[in-house]
Amino acid sequence: MEELGENKLLTSNLRHLVSTKVKQSNCAKCGSAIWVGLVDGFEIKVDPTPLDATTEIMLRLEGVQIYQTFGVVGSQFELQRRSAWHITKGDAKAVALASHGCKRGVSYFVDLFPKPQAKEVNF
C-alpha cells in the first residue's frame, strides 16, 4: 500500500515535466480539425486557427485557455501555456492558439472582424 502511494506521488510530480509534440486529429464530438498533445502532463486540444492580438484578448475575456507554439522543427512543434511573460517578452515567432471548444469555434471571433473585400468597379 505504501509503495502505491510513492508511485502516485512520483507520477503527480512528473506530469509537470511531460510535453509532447502535437498531432493532427478530429474532435470526436463535433468533427472539427484540432491538434492534440500533452502540456504539463495534461492532454489538451487546440483549434488550428492562429490568433491575432484582438481575438486573443476576446477569447481570454471569455475564459478560454490560450497556448503557444515552441520547439518548432519543420512541421512538428510543442505547445505551452501562454502567459503575460510570453506575450510581452516571449518568442516573437510563437503562434497563439486557443483551446478547443465544440460550441465555441474560433472562427466565430475571427469572423467578427472580416477583412475588407475589394468592391467590383463597373464602367
Image (tube, rainbow, N blue to C red):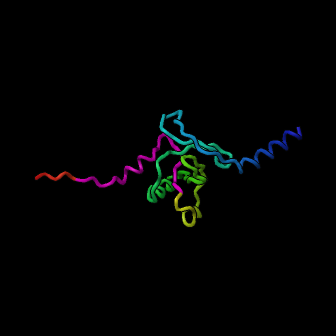
Residue 85: quadrant of the picture: bottom right
- Of all residues shown, which one is farthest toward the right? 2
The residue drawn where x is 52% and y is 62% is 92
Q: Main secondary structure of the magenta part?
A: loop
In the rendered image, residue 69, in percent from the top left (x then y), is placed at 56, 53
- Residue at 33% x, 54% y: name it: 115
User: Residue most toward the bottom?
Assistant: 89
**Number of marks:** 0
In which quadrant will I find the N terminus? top right
Q: Name the one closer to the observer, 108 or 89.
A: 89
List the single residue furthest toward the front: 74
Residue 98 lies in the magenta-colored region: yes
What span is in magenta? 94-118
Q: From this view, report whether residue 85 is shown above or below residue 102.
A: below
Q: Left or right of 45: which side holds 7?
A: right
Q: Position of residue 2 (x, y in %)?
A: 89, 41
Which residue occupies 52% across, 41% down? 34
Q: Report if residue 41 lies within the magenta region.
A: no
Give the residue drawn at x 54%, y 39%: 24
84 w.r.t. 29: above or below? below
List x then y, in percent, for residue 31.
48, 34
Q: Position of residue 54 (x, y in %)?
A: 44, 59
Q: Nearer the viewer, residue 22 or 8?
A: 22
